[in-house]
Image (spheres, coloured by chain):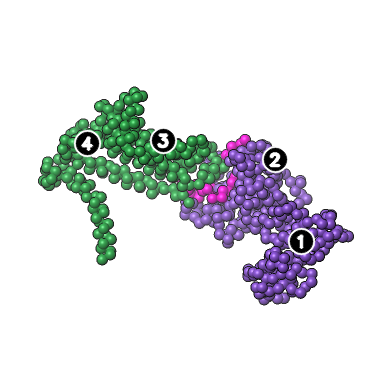
Amino acid sequence: MTASRTERRKIVSLSGVRKAFGNRVVLPGLDLDIYRGEFVTLLGPSGCGKTTILRLIGGFESPDAGSILLDGEDIAALDPSQRPVNTVFQSYALFPHMSVFDNVAYGLRAERRPEEEIERRVGDMLRMVQLEELARRKPDQLSGGQQQRVAIARALVKGPRLLLLDEPLSALDYKLRKQMQNELKRMQRELGITFLFITHDQEEALSMSDRVVVLRDGVIEQSGTPRDVYESPANLFVARFVGEINVLDVRVIAQLEGGRLLAEIEGKQREFDAGQHRFAPGTRLHALLRPEDMRLLPADDGSALPGEVVERNYKGMMLETLIRLDSGRQLQACEFFDESDPDFDYLLGERVGVSWVPGWEVLLADEGA
Amino acid sequence: MLNWLKYGYLSLVYLLLYLPIGVLLLYSFNASKNPYRWGGFSWHWYERLWQNTALIDAAANTLLLAISAATLSTLIGTLTAIALQRYRFRGKRFLNGMLFVVMMSPDIVLAISLLALFILVGVQLGFLSLLLAHVTFCLPFVVITVYARLSGFTPQILEAARDLGASEFRMVRTVLLPVISPALLAGWLLGFTLSLDDVVVSMFVTGPTFEILPLRIYSMVRLGIKPEVNALASVLLLLSLAALVGSQYLLTRNAPHTP
């Protein structure tokens, strides 16, 4: 899939897009390409500029500089009503005085389509989101999940070339959210429409997208498949934002044969896999470790980092532990229950040794952060 | 005991509110000319009212003035509310504050300053001066009513309409106006009633060519209460009740609820 990406057609191409509100620069100069049929998620904390990007593409803001191309055509000056792009708004923004049917039909009526065609296309769309029976209801007679479906149907009925989704699931409860995530993925596959989704929820971003774009202060920190972003974060910000992570300080002692590295970590000497990188002795690095890659060993294991259990949380299918190392640093570990030892558990204050699967750590240069 | 006290108190409050109106209604049917004695049921005063062309003319003038003032202030007030709610511009807070100044300032102050202004500018006292004055004091109420409605729904529904391909005009016609229509009606009715029963401001800015009902009644009462006034007040009461019930019916029938 990654190999074919270069051959695929760009549907949206933002280059050098700058946007400021008064003195506050939201996007200092953004380059972003979205390819046909992709499910792209913009992920970032609030205020990172993700909503502004959506509003620029939708036509509700205009860029101070740069170009926005849709299928090769510059749309930066086009009115929102002229763009072949539709939006699912965060608060659904359903028209309160219209029935479900009229809400979905609104875009087609604005295009002055014949009434039979409207009837048919709205009917098809309502069937897809399973709301046929509720077509005569008003939005305030629907549950949150149903309102959400109406908003999606309304945005999809015109067959946009690109669908923009502005945190559409943030108001739903956990179960409904999971269900809608699957439905959105299904619709995207069935209709073949490109989705640009924004969220601040990393779990949602990872589970739904073909590609995740992590943003901070209007700058793209990393763009890649969910697996890339989670397993090989480009920097400390991405690592910390996408999932839980432990950060340990490492000082290089010597570069060894075959890309191996001898380094000091929390007072112990260990070997690391440096890959292509070469580090001079004395270089300070960060080792990043996901909680699920940590292994808890008996306290007397010589190679492990000694510490004690300060918190344990039972999570159903796994056990989450917080360990304070003797150096004072706290680490999170997360172990799954398995058949060999279904009742493993720790006491608070129990002495343990912390280790990890060799080679699963990510080494990053110390950014001074 | 507590229950009795509760209902007793409530009855007392309502009695205090409605007793005068009840007496007025009752005495509009009084056959006796003496306002302190019940002389049997009669339509007499209603007949006399119907023959009193000066009073009928004044009532027609008042209705014309109230409808014009309410309509004009609803038009101007709605546009003002939209501007204040949707756009950011220099001096917005000042403009907003000035509305409250007009609303809070005593009628007598407004009346004197309007009169001074009209004389200075050379506006002939009569229908025009009354209309300008009434629009002035109705305006803040309309703006506040419509503004509250506009703040009650998410501005994203307007963007959604544009996003779905509606022109600015179509968006206003099919989304904005239907959603704020209850507030428009409420603002209009508020302006209508304010204009209908204003005495203080009207007294100052009225002219000899255009007599309105509140001032006419006021001058009649000064010479002693004529029972025709009771009949007239009863008719007005009936009309305003009908308007109230009618508007409530319209509002509940197609009330757009905001989520």
Q: Which residue is mark 1?
A: A361
The residue shown at (77%, 63%) is A265
The purple-coloured chain is labelled A
Q: Specify the amino acid type for callout 1.
A: Glu
How far apart, in angstroms, are the residues tagged by discs 3 and 2?
45 Å
Q: Is residue A36 visible?
A: no
Badge 1 vs badge 4, beta-carbon distance below 8 Å: no
For discs 3 and 1, the disc positioned in front in the rendered view: 1
Badge 3 vs badge 1, beta-carbon distance below 8 Å: no
Q: Chain of mark 4?
A: B
The residue shown at (35%, 38%) is B105
Residue A99: within the magenta? yes
Q: Chain of mark 1?
A: A
Region rendered in magenta: A76-104
Mark on residue B217?
A: 4
Quadrant position of residue A85 = top right
Q: Which residue is mark 3?
A: B75
Q: Specify the amino acid type for callout 4.
A: Ile
The residue shown at (67%, 55%) is A241
Residue A76 point in image, percent of width and height: 64, 37
Question: Which of the two residues, A277 or B68, is positioned nearer the viewer here?
Answer: A277
Q: Is the residue at mark 4 from the same chain as the one at mark 2?
A: no
Q: Chain of mark 2?
A: A
How far apart, in angstroms, are the residues tagged by discs 1 and 4?
92 Å
How far apart, in angstroms, are the residues tagged by discs 3 and 4?
30 Å
Q: Specify the amino acid type for callout 3.
A: Leu
The green-coloured chain is labelled B
